[in-house]
Image (tube, rainbow, N blue to C red):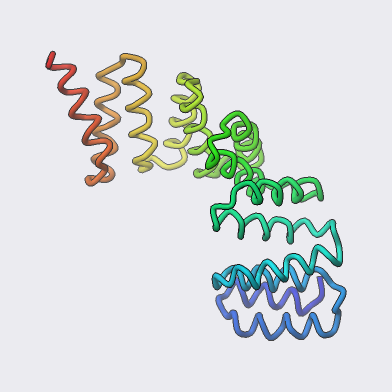
Amino acid sequence: MTDKNQQAVKEMQEGDLEAAAKLLNEAIEEHPEDPVAYTNFGNLLAAVKEDEKALRFFEKAISIDENAAAAHYGKGNIFFNQDNFEKAIEAYQKTLEHGLLESDVYYMLGLSYYQMNDLSHALPSLQRAIELNPKDIDANFHYALTLAQLELVDQAVEAFNDVLLLDPEHADSCFNLGVAYAYKDEAEKALKMFERAIAIQPDHVLSHNGKKQIEAQLNGN
């Protein structure tokens, strides 16, 4: 990475996108065959929701160097944000093939499969994301959700509890634990989890509904 690329990334991180754009323009003029500058410019454009322009920069980086893993990842994120999950999966797989074996890539790949309801493919990607970054709350949560939807309920309970160890205020995990306990006919535990979700997030509609159903069940109605 050239100095101007490094400076540009720093400016982007600090929120000065105009300065970053100027530096990246200069970097591209000085080194027109450097895929890194095009990738960084793509990331900058993606940050301001200029998706089609961003894609063109990522494509340019890849045309210079097919192994530009970060450009493939940028493409994947654009497609994901456009709900084009098939193309996102393809881009994320290429990201991994070209050596960017990071937690975020596995998470986004798993999330793309999850959005397509391809749970058997989502599970190993999300599991790998957690192995690489055990403290990633979103990856842990979606891993737990995937287990639950595959009806691996005991494993899902364990995984939702892992999320609550990382974030005790995670209302959606409390709700899903309530559902899991209800599924296991453990009504008292289910009620506690729905109540905990409501205590954290008073407008958690699904937890209010779950609480009513469990209370009716416990009261013999």
Q: In which quarter of the image is residue 122?
A: top right
- The residue sitting at 27% across, 32% down in the picture is 194
User: In this image, 11 relative to 210: left or right?
Assistant: right
Q: In which quarter of the image is the N terminus?
A: bottom right
Relative to 207, 66 lies left or right = right
Q: Residue at x 66, y 81 (%)?
A: 21
Above or below residue 70? Residue 134 is: above
In the rendered image, residue 92, in percent from the top left (x then y), is placed at 69, 49
Q: Which residue is depicted at the point 63% across and 49% down?
A: 104
- Total count of labels: 0
Left or right: where 221 falls relative to 11: left
Which quadrant: the C terminus?
A: top left
Give x and y (percent) for residue 150: 51, 24
Q: Residue 184 is drawn in which quadrant?
A: top left
Viewer-side residue, 95 vs 13:
95
> Image quarter for residue 26?
bottom right
Query: Can you say whether 107 is above or below 214 in the image?
Result: below
Query: Residue 89: percent from the left, percent from the top?
Result: 66, 46
Observer-nearest residue: 160 or 77?
77
Q: Where is residue 124 in the image (x, y as percent from the top left)?
A: 64, 32
Residue at position x 17%, y 23% in the image: 215
The answer to which of 95 and 2 lies nearer the viewer is 95
Location of residue 220 with respect to 16 vertically, above or below: above
